[in-house]
Image (cartoon, grey):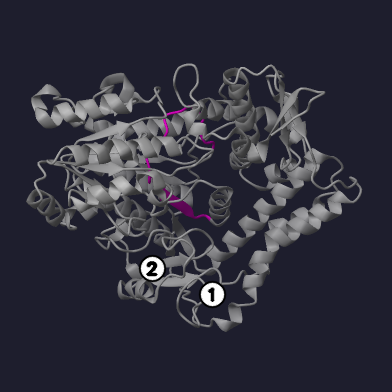
Amino acid sequence: MTQGDRTAILRWNVEKIFDQVGADLGDMPNERGESLWWEIERASTAITPLVVSQITPTSAYRFLLKSLPSEKVSIYFHKHVKRIIFPAVRALYVAQWQAKHMGSELRHEVIWTDHEGLGPALQAVWPDDSIPLMLVSRVKYSLAVRPLLVKLRNATRSIGRHARASFLRGSAPNLPITPENTISVHYREGVDSSRRSDTFWNADLLADPERILILIGGERTAYQGRRVPGEVLRQIEHAGMRWVCLEQGQVAQNGAPVWGQNCRGKSLLRQFQRELTSPSDPIELWAASVSRWLLGEIDYWASLFTDFNVKVHVDVAGANDRHIAQNIALDLIGGVRVGWQRSEQVSLDGWDIGHLSNHAYFTWNKRALADAEADRMHIGPVLISGFPYDGSWKEDNGQRKLRDGLIERGTQFTVALFDNMIMRDDIYSNNMLRNLYLAFLEWVLAEPHVGVITKSKKPSILQELPEIQGLMAEAEATGRWINLTDVFGRLPSDASRAADISVGIGISTAASEAVAAGGRAIHCDLPAMRSHPFYQWGYEKVVFDNLDRMMNALKRYMADPASEPGLGDFSSAMDQIDPFCDGKAGERIGSYIAHLLKSFDSDLDRDQAIHKANEDYAQKWGQESVRQAEYWSQERTTTL
C-alpha cells in the first residue's frame, strides 16, 4: 500500500489487495450483515455481458459463431470474461469497503496489471467512478509486434501440449482401443465405492465394465498431484474396465499406455489460423487468443473421443473452460457429456455462468434444479437423482465402532463437525474457522458428556489454525474429540452417521449429506447468505448466521431435546435435500448412462439417445424428475 504525500491517493493492487488490506474477504460484511462476496458475485455477473458485448463484433468471435453451436460460444466467452474480470471487480468492492470503514479522506484507486487486454473493456462499463480502475501493462510493445507474439504463444499453448503427447503414441502399443461404443470416465475421485467415486453409478453393473475407459491425467485427481498408485490401477482392471493416461508420469507404472492426439484430418484451429487476419486492436487480440485456445481444446477432445469410440463422457467436474470444450467436441462427434451435482448449489442469481457444461446433468433435488435454471449454469437437460453417493450407506464404514468408542468415554451427545477451505479472497475466513473450532473445543473440555467427530475438507485446514492446536490436543486427550484421517475424498457421512447432529460451516454440502443419510444437521452460515431458501422456513432451526446463538441452541437441545424440537430437523423438507431417500441414486444415474449407450448401439443419433433416455427416466422415476434443456442466452442478465 502506498500513500502519496502530494496526491493523497490510496492505491490498491488487484493481485495483492488482501496483502495490502491485511484482512480476509470473509470478515467484510455488507450493510445487511451478509458477506461482501455475494455482492461481488452479483456485480461480476451483471457486468460480464456488458464486457462481452464489446467482443462479439470481433472477427474471431464471428468465426466461432459460424463453426460452433452459437449458445455455447456465448457461454464460453461469458464464463471466460467473468473469470478474468472477477479479481478486478472484487478489488474495487474491497477498496470501496475499506474507504467506507477506514474513515479515510484519501482518494482511492485500484491498479490492475493482469487484465489480459480486457482492462479497457471493464473500464468502459464500470458503473462507479468514485474509485477509478487504473491499468498497467507489465510488458509494453507495439500493436505491430504483439499480434505475432500472441499468435506464436497461443499456437504453442493450444497445440503444443497435445502435439507433445502425440510423440508418445508409438511407445504405447497397448492403447485400450475398441471398435465398440465406449463410455469414458475422467478419473478424479477414484473407484472406491466406500468413498466419493467416479464410478459409483455402475455399482450394479448396469453398463458393461469392458466398455468403460478411465482417462487419467490432465486435471486434478484424488491423489492431489501424486501418481495414481498401482493398487488403484489393479482395482480398475479387476473390475473389468480399461484405463489410459493422457500425459506421461500420471501413474506409478512403467510403460503405461499414453494416448497422443492424432493431428491429421480436419482441424478447427488450423482453419482458424488460415482465415483470421492479424488482429489490429486489444480486443481483437484478446478474442483471437482465447479463440485459439478453445479451438485447440476442441480439436484435442474430438480426436480423443473419436480414437476411443467414445459416445458418452462421464465427469463430475464441469466448472472450467476445458469442460465447455469437451461439450462442444462431443457435439461435433455426436456424443453426450454426463455430470452430476457434487456440492451444495449456491442460491444466488447468476453466480456462475455455464458452470455445468453437460448434455445431461443430475441434481439432488428440485431446489438445485431451480438454482441451475435461475443461474443459467446448465446447457442441457437436468434430472433429479437424489444424493449421488448414497449407495455407500448400505454398509457400516466404521461408524458403529466410532460411536461405541465415544460412549465408552462417557459421551452422551456427539456432534459431527465439518469445516471448509480457508481463503483470504473467498467467503470463509481464518477467523470464521478458528472461532467455529474454538466454540466446540471449549464445549468438549467444559462438558464431559459431549463428543465431537470432525471430517475436515482437507488435511491442510487444521494446519492453518495453529491457535487451536493446544486446545485440540487437550480435547483429543479426553478421547471425546476425534479428527478423522485420510479426509480427502472421504464421505462426511463417515462422521455424521456416528453422531446425534451435524454442523457444517456455510450452506454446507456435508450438512446436507448428513440429512440425506438420515440425520439432523445445522448450516452454520457465518457468510450469511440470507437469500437461501433455508432462511425462509428454517432460520435458527436448520440455518444460523450467528455462532453464539447456534451454540446456545445446541446446548439447550442436548439438555432437553423437547426444548428445541426443530433443531437440525429437515423431516418436513426432505424434498429440498433428497426427494427419494432410497439409496438408489447411483442406480438412477447408471441406468440413464446405460440407456444412452444402448441407444447409440441401436444407431440412434445423439438427440434421439438423450430424448429416449429422458423418456425412460421420467417413466420410471416421475415426469417431475426431468427438466428439458433450456439453453442460456446472453439476453438473460442480472442487474447491479
Q: Position of residue 611 (x, y in %)?
A: 40, 45
Instruction: Please tell me in which quadrant of the rendered image residue 306 appears.
Output: bottom right
Please name whichever residue, 71 or 430, is drawn nearer the observer in this view of the structure: 430
Q: Residue 504's mark?
A: none
Residue at coordinates 13% horizontally, 57% vertically from top-left?
401
Look at the picture and state if 536 lies above or below 114: above
SS at mark 1?
A: loop
Please name whichever residue, 40 or 285, is drawn nearer the observer in this view of the structure: 40
Look at the picture and state if 159 lies above or below 47: below
Residue at coordinates 57% horizontally, 25% vertically from top-left?
637
- Quarter containing the C terminus: top right
Instruction: Please tell me in which quadrant of the rendered image residue 273 appears.
Output: bottom right
Decide if residue 385 is in sight here: no
Q: Which residues are magenta?
A: 334-353
| Residue type for callout 2 | Arg
Look at the picture and state if 299 lies above or below 6: below
Please name whichever residue, 593 or 100, is drawn nearer the observer in this view of the structure: 100
Query: Residue 165 vs residue 237: left or right?
Result: right
* Label 1 or label 2, whichever comes before in sequence order: 2
Q: Position of residue 588 (x, y in %)?
A: 28, 49
Query: Residue 124 vs residue 241: left or right?
Result: right
| Residue type for callout 1 | Val
Query: Residue 177 vs residue 70: left or right?
Result: left
Q: Say which residue label 1 marks.
A: 258
The answer to whether residue 344 is magenta is yes
Instruction: Please tell me in which quadrant of the rendered image residue 203 appears.
Output: bottom left
Q: Position of residue 222 (x, y in %)?
A: 41, 60
Q: Residue 211's mark?
A: 2
Residue at coordinates 9% horizontally, 41% vertically from top-left?
412
Q: Position of residue 156 (x, y in %)?
A: 73, 62
SS at mark 2?
A: helix
Query: Magenta residues: mostly which secondary structure?
Result: loop
